[in-house]
């Protein structure tokens, strides 16, 4: 399968660091089935860990994340003034992956509101992707965001996420 190239010229890829997990029995989608997975959860919930699990053995998977925008040479440097740019880049990556027909596209962002997910859902409809929302809970006080997000901010995001979950 040909790599998908971002608009800035760099390749889209699955995560390079995959934690060691026991084998998981997951049936891949049928060849004609294309899926967009919208991960939802506060910082530190484990979205990137779940992403690693979902992409093991899936060369057809593409992970799009605003965090990728802030990572250069393996170093994460968040800049709140560039957050809109990061989300625009993530959206462009998702569009490129769907345009390229990748079978599995995962959006590894917080997605705590309906508004955050709507553009991805519109892309999925445009390119014929089934959409799955996967909410990751943050339980226990020991799990912390690797990005240093303050607890007050996480509590605010959790309240917005909780208010937008549909059962």
Image (spheres, rainbow, N blue to C red):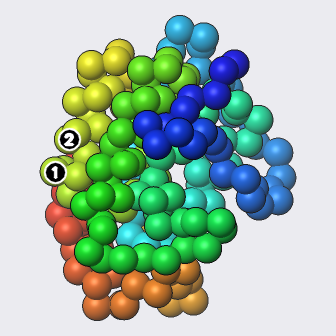
User: Is 99 rendered above or below residue 52?
Assistant: above
- The picture places residue 129, in percent across and down from the top left corner, at 39, 22
Residue 98 tag number: none
- The answer to whether residue 139 shows anywhere in this view is no
Q: Nearer the viewer, residue 141 or 34?
A: 34
User: Is 32 rendered above or below residue 61?
Assistant: above
- Give the farthest residue toward the top: 32
- The picture places residue 148, in percent across and down from the top left corner, at 46, 87
Mark 1 and mark 2 residues within 8 Å of each other at the beta carbon: yes
Relative placement, left or right, of 13 versus 116 is right
- The picture places residue 150, in percent across and down from the top left corner, at 37, 90
Q: Residue at coordinates 21% horizontally, 57% vertically from top-left? A: 113
Q: Residue at coordinates 30% horizontally, 76% vertically from top-left? A: 80
User: Mark 2 highlights which residue?
Assistant: 118
- Image quadrant where one finds the N terminus: top right
Say which quarter of the image contains residue 63.
Answer: top right
State how far apart marks 1 and 2 are (Cα).
5 Å
User: Mark 1 highlights which residue?
Assistant: 115
Say which quarter of the image contains residue 25.
Answer: top right
């Amino acid at each position: 399968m040909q790599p998908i190239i971002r608009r800035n010229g760099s390749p889209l890829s699955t995560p390079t660091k995959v934690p060691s997990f026991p084998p998981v029995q997951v049936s891949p989608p049928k060849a004609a089935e294309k899926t967009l997975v919208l991960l939802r959860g506060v910082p530190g919930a484990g979205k990137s860990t779940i992403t690693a699990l979902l992409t093991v053995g899936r060369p057809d998977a593409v992970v799009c994340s605003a965090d990728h925008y802030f990572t250069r040479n393996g170093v994460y440097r968040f800049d709140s003034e560039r957050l809109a740019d990061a989300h625009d880049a993530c959206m462009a990556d998702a569009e490129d992956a769907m345009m390229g027909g990748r079978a599995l596209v995962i959006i590894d962002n917080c997605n705590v509101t309906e508004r955050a997910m709507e553009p991805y859902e519109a892309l999925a409809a445009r390119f014929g992707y089934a959409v799955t929302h996967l909410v990751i809970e943050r339980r226990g006080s020991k799990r912390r965001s690797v990005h240093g997000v303050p607890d007050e901010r996480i509590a605010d995001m959790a309240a917005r996420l909780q208010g937008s979950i549909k059962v």
